[in-house]
Every structure is written in structure tokens, then in C-alpha cells.
Image (spheres, rainbow, N blue to C red):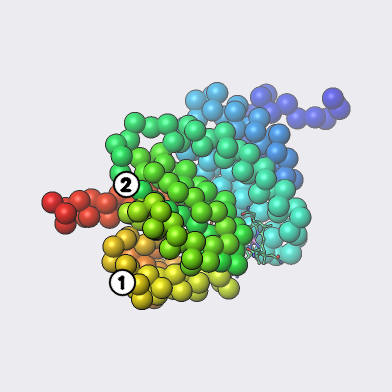
Amino acid sequence: MSDDEIILSELSDDELVQQMHDDLYDGLKEEIEEGTHILLERGWEPYKVLTEALVEGMRIVGEDFRDGILFVPEVLLSANAMKAGMAILRPLLAATNAPKQGKLVIGTVKGDIHDIGKNLVGMMMEGAGFDVVDLGINNPVENYLAAIEEHQPDIIGMSALLTTTMPYMKVVIDTMKEKGIRDDFVVLVGGAPLNEEFGKAVGADAYCRDAAVAVETAKEFMKRRHNVRA
Ligand code: B1M
């Protein structure tokens, strides 16, 4: 151990969160895992660890990626570190006694390989009592249609992080319309470059700003569906 090595467990909560932002920036997977465990042991709620230590750290990475200070290989390491922290939180977020809500099929659209936000939405939805079928990344419309057929979900969720891939959501929704099945499902969309207006323009039922909004929106739509059926 070098003299200047930082002992994470000796830091205060604020210092540790700050250090985790730095470690995420530097793509240090093991440190992120350790920091996540320490915050949980100190009694932090998994959601607080997720938002304040991990998501906030990734926001900083995103700014420097945008400004050309960080490049793809470095951001990939950050993403790996983030995923390692998320893997620790996942069972904790999913382990609620929430009543069963319904089924969600979710995937990142064709041409797009960003999956952290989608994974986060999936985790939070599981925690809220939804069964989640995750289609992964780079999904052509055929994948959504096949999953609809196989899993008979209540909700279709689509994620896109690129301005070049977000229009593909309309391709999926238009194909559902052509097949006469659009109104059988709730369609929710999300991803950093989207907004409310875009969600309306592509014909989604709602745009979800973040994972917490996705959960609330999904629950609201399930309530409406149950009322209509009743
Ligand atoms: Co990329 N990337 N990236 N990237 N990347 C962005 C998106 C970018 C904004 C960075 C920047 O310039 N500031 C920019 C897009 C610019 C644009 O389109 N105008 C960009 C670019 C340009 C690229 C490449 C083209 C770079 C290149 O190759 N030159 C390339 C494209 C690859 C491809 O997809 N074909 C690329 C690649 C990558 C990596 C592979 C290195 C890596 C992805 C790793 C991975 O996901 N496994 C990566 C990353 C990590 C990012 C940033 C830095 C972070 C994204 C992220 O994970 N955020 C991102 C910068 C940014 O977004 N500001 C950037 C954290 C996550 C929790 O937030 O995904 O927004 P987010 O999810 C939120 C909400 O949006 C919402 O809830 C989530 C949780 O609260 N939400 C949903 C998301 N999906 C939802 C679905 C729903 C509901 C809500 O359904 C119901």
C-alpha cells in the first residue's frame, strides 16, 4: 500500500461520495464496489446510493465526454464501474414486497448501445413490482414485436441516448399501429436527449424523465387499465 492511498472506509459520507465520483470518473470498478458497500453498511438507502454516488458521478463523466476531455475508452471504464455498483444495488432495489403490477418489456432501440439508464429503469420497475423483460441494446422493431408476442406485456419501454437513434422509436410505434396493436399496450419512452414534446410527436403514451418517473408513470397507467377493465 502506498503512503497516499485513500482508505475509503475512513472517509466521511460526503468525502466518500466525492471520492466515488472521482473513482467513477477514473473507471475504478473495485473502488466503486467498495464505496457502494460502505454506504450501504452505513445505512444509506440503495436508491440514495444509486442517485447521489453513481448517477451523479456519471453526470460528471457525461459533461467531460461532451467537452472532449474524456473519450470512449475512458467512458467505457466508467460505465463498467457504474454497472458494478448497480449490480450490488439491484437485488436490494428489487427486494420489496410491492404487489405485482404488470409486465414491462424494455429495450434500447436500434443503432444505440447505451444501456445504463435502461438497466436502471428495469431495476426500479422490478423493485416496484413489475415483471421486467430486458431486450438489451440495439433492438430493431422485430425484437419488440417478437417480445410482445412471447411475453404479452402491459407496457413497452424504449430507451435512446442518441439524437440519431431516438427517431427509431417512431418506427416501432408506427409498426405497432400498422399491425393494429398499438392501443393494446402502454408505450413509455426515455433517454437523455428526449423530452415531453418528442414523446408526444412519436406517439408514445408518455415520456419519462428518469427511472423514478418511469415507475410512477407505469403505475398510473396500470391503475387506469385496471379501472377500464373493471
Ligand atoms: Co455515449 N453519448 N456515445 N457512450 N454517452 C452520450 C449519450 C452523449 C450525450 C455524450 C456527450 O456528447 N455529452 C453523446 C450523444 C450526443 C447526441 O446524440 N447528441 C454520446 C455519443 C456521441 C456517443 C458515441 C457516438 C461516441 C462515439 O463513438 N464517438 C457512441 C455511440 C455508440 C452507440 O450507441 N451506437 C457512444 C458510446 C458510449 C459508451 C459505449 C462509451 C458509453 C455507453 C456504455 C453503456 O451504456 N453501457 C457511453 C456513455 C456512458 C455516455 C454518457 C456519458 C452517459 C450515459 C449514461 O449512462 N447516463 C452520455 C452522456 C449523457 O447522457 N449526458 C453519452 C447515466 C444514466 C443513468 O442516464 O441513460 O440518461 P440516462 O438514463 C436516465 C434517463 O434518461 C431515463 O432514466 C434513466 C435513469 O434515471 N431513461 C429512461 C433512460 N432510458 C429510459 C427508458 C425509459 C424510461 C426512462 O423507458 C420507459
Q: Is residue 40 left or right of residue 95?
A: right
Q: Nearer the viewer, residue 105 or 3?
A: 105
- Residue 20: x percent and y percent? 65, 39
- Residue 4: x percent and y percent? 83, 30
Q: Is residue 210 left or right of residue 6?
A: left
Q: Which mark is first along the chain, 2 or 1?
A: 2
Q: Quadrant of the N terminus?
A: top right
Element carrying mark 1:
loop
Q: Which residue is mark 2?
A: 102
Q: Is residue 59 left or right of residue 187?
A: right
Q: Residue at x 36, y 62 (%)?
A: 187
Element carrying mark 2:
strand
Under mark 2, the amino acid is Gly
Q: Quadrant of residue 36?
A: top right
Under mark 1, the amino acid is Gly
Q: Nearer the viewer, residue 2 or 208?
A: 208
Q: Residues within 10 Å of mark 2 (few under 14, many from 20)?
A: some
* Dot in front, 1 or 2: 1
Q: Residue furthest right?
A: 2
Ligand 1 positioned in quadrant: bottom right
Count of residue discs: 2
User: Could you tell me if residue 19 is visible in this image?
Assistant: no
Q: Residue at x 60, y 67 (%)?
A: 111
Q: Quadrant of residue 54?
A: top right
Q: Residue at x 70, y 34 (%)?
A: 31
- Residue 67: x percent and y percent? 70, 65
Q: Residues within 10 Å of mark 1 (few under 14, many from 20)?
A: few
- The numbered dot on residue 180 is 1
Q: Nearer the viewer, residue 161 or 131?
A: 131
